[in-house]
Image (tube, rainbow, N blue to C red):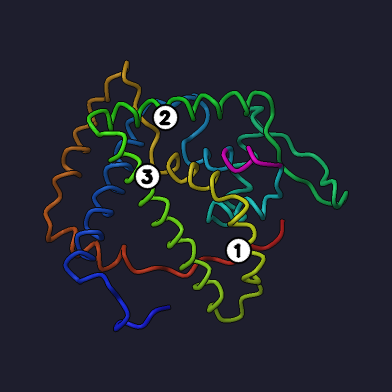
Amino acid sequence: MSSPSSFHLDRETAERVSLGLIRLMKLLQSMRQHAPRIHPAVDATAYPILFNLAAEPRRVSVLAEVVHSDVSTVSRQVSTLEGHGLVDKVSDPADGRAQVVQLSEEGTALLKGIQQQRTEWFRELMGDWTPEEASTFAAHLERFGADLERQREQLLARRPGSTTPTSTTTSTTTSTTTSTEQASAEQASTPPSAAEPASAGSTSTGSTSTTPASTDTASATTSATPTRPTRSTEN
């Protein structure tokens, strides 16, 4: 990690970024709570699993790694998805004693629906942006995400007693960059349908977006401090 003297970002701008991201996360979380579900029996928190299975079948432990969760949580989510016919568990071709999770036909169709809804929602949300502005914003988001991934690898490498090799984790991250980024957006929020108004409780979105700076500053101290991720074990 760079020393403080090598930082090019001034403290005032860093604080703007911190407060902006905190406000953004609060808004997305509030919108997720009030958005209608695409699938009536599947919570949006399970969508990252579907996105990461689009690339290839994966073991539960690998899914936990790429969605930045713990194995027990992902295992429960996979069981729920399997119960609704969205994923299947099959023998691992590389090791018949283990199982991998793969999308079913219904799961593939659901994933396409999520992608289409999300794309149209962002097109509407950024309707008054020029193509150049939107493209530049997307590039900055991709760069910011890559920096977060890199710092996560550094935290894993410094974790005392960690048995997760950095090279293995990096390889997994590289091979799933696109699906993980897509999944992160879905995990943060499910875009509300343009045809379906928000519920009466959606006024919390407004209160979230107008959180006083003093409150967000306090939150920034906690939220902006990276936590050390939990080590996943093979399922």
Q: Which residue is mark 3?
A: 138
What is the CA distance from the residue labelled 3 to the residue labelled 1? 23 Å
Q: How many marks?
A: 3
Q: Earlier in the sequence, mark 1 or mark 2?
A: 2
SS state under label 3: helix
Residue 26 picture location, percent across and down: 28, 47
**Mark 3 residue crowding within 10 angstroms, few (<14) / some (14–19) / many (20+):** few
Q: Which residue is mark 2?
A: 119
Residue 149 picture location, percent across and down: 48, 61
Q: Earlier in the sequence, mark 3 or mark 1?
A: 3
On-image quarter of the N terminus = bottom left
In the image, what residue occupies the spot 39% across and 57% down? 144
Q: Which residue is mark 1?
A: 170
- Say which quarter of the image contains residue 172: bottom right
In the image, what residue occupies the spot 45% across and 43% down? 187
Residue 78 picture location, percent across and down: 63, 41
Residue at the far top: name it.
195
- Is residue 54 covered in magenta? yes
Q: Are marks 3 and 1 in contact (CB under 8 Å)?
A: no
In the image, what residue occupies the spot 43% across and 55% down? 145
Q: Does residue 233 lie above or below 131 as drawn?
A: below
Amino acid of disc 1 = Thr
SS state under label 1: helix
Q: Are marks 2 and 3 in contact (CB under 8 Å)?
A: no
Tag shown at residue 26: none
Q: Which residues are magenta?
A: 51-56
Q: Does residue 140 lie above or below 88 as drawn?
A: below
Q: Are marks 1 and 2 in contact (CB under 8 Å)?
A: no
SS state under label 2: helix
Amino acid of disc 3 = Ala
What is the CA distance from the residue labelled 2 to the residue labelled 3? 13 Å
**Mark 2 residue crowding within 10 angstroms, few (<14) / some (14–19) / many (20+):** few
